[in-house]
Amino acid sequence: MRVVGIRVEPPQSQPVLLLREVDGERYLPIWIGQSEAASIALQQKGIEPPRPLTHDLIVNLINDFGKTLREVRIVDMQEGTFYAEMVFADELRVSARPSDSIAVAMRAGVPIVADEDVLTEAGLLIPDENGDEDAPAEAKEDEVEKFKEFLDNVSPDDFKASGGA
């Protein structure tokens, strides 16, 4: 998975982090806090703050303690809340919020992986932005508009499992 964007609307709205399959069309929308969104956005833009942010500090601590972060895994979703693990080279796994884990993964240059069960349950299938070359431009634009409208109207509660399953 790779981070494809963060959608931040007015301050009262919660930012949405979009992860996309590297070799697929599914997206995983994860609602995150404002500070984590800002941290991820700074990293995406290549902006280096004058002093380390919390996620920079975590990467510095990992390195200074001689550990190697291998990957970040999105391992579960329960009642609309995602769960992640930071996986180290010695198979140590540390539970963490996806937003923090992803911010650290981006700084450490390690893969972000979502378990197939999570993608099946919460992934959204939308056409590849590079799309089918034969598809008319109007159809591609229409799909993008539909997805933007979806993001404008969806809330974390929409991803809570319905009773019984």
Image: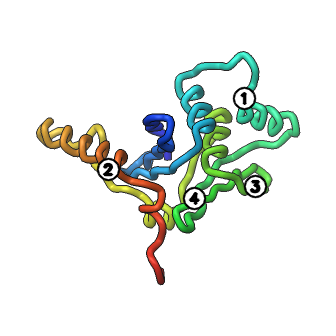
How packed mark 3 is, by other alpha carbons closer than 10 Å (few <14, some 14-19, many 20 or more), is few
Gap between marks 1 and 4 measured at Cα: 23 Å
Foreground tag (3 vs 4): 4
- Eye-nearest disc, 2 or 4: 2
Q: Secondary structure at mark 2?
A: helix
Looking at the rendered structure, the secondary structure element under dot 3 is: strand
Q: CA distance from mark 2 to mark 4?
A: 20 Å
Residue 105: % across, % down: 64, 40
Q: Which residue is mark 3?
A: 94
Q: Residue 21: horizontal and vertical position, in percent?
A: 44, 49
Identify the mark at residue 53; answer none if there is no mark: 1
Point 44% across, 38% down: residue: 7
Q: Position of residue 63 (x, y in %)?
A: 81, 35
Q: Which residue matches tag 2?
A: 150
Q: Are marks 1 and 4 in contact (CB under 8 Å)?
A: no
Residue 82, label in figure: 4
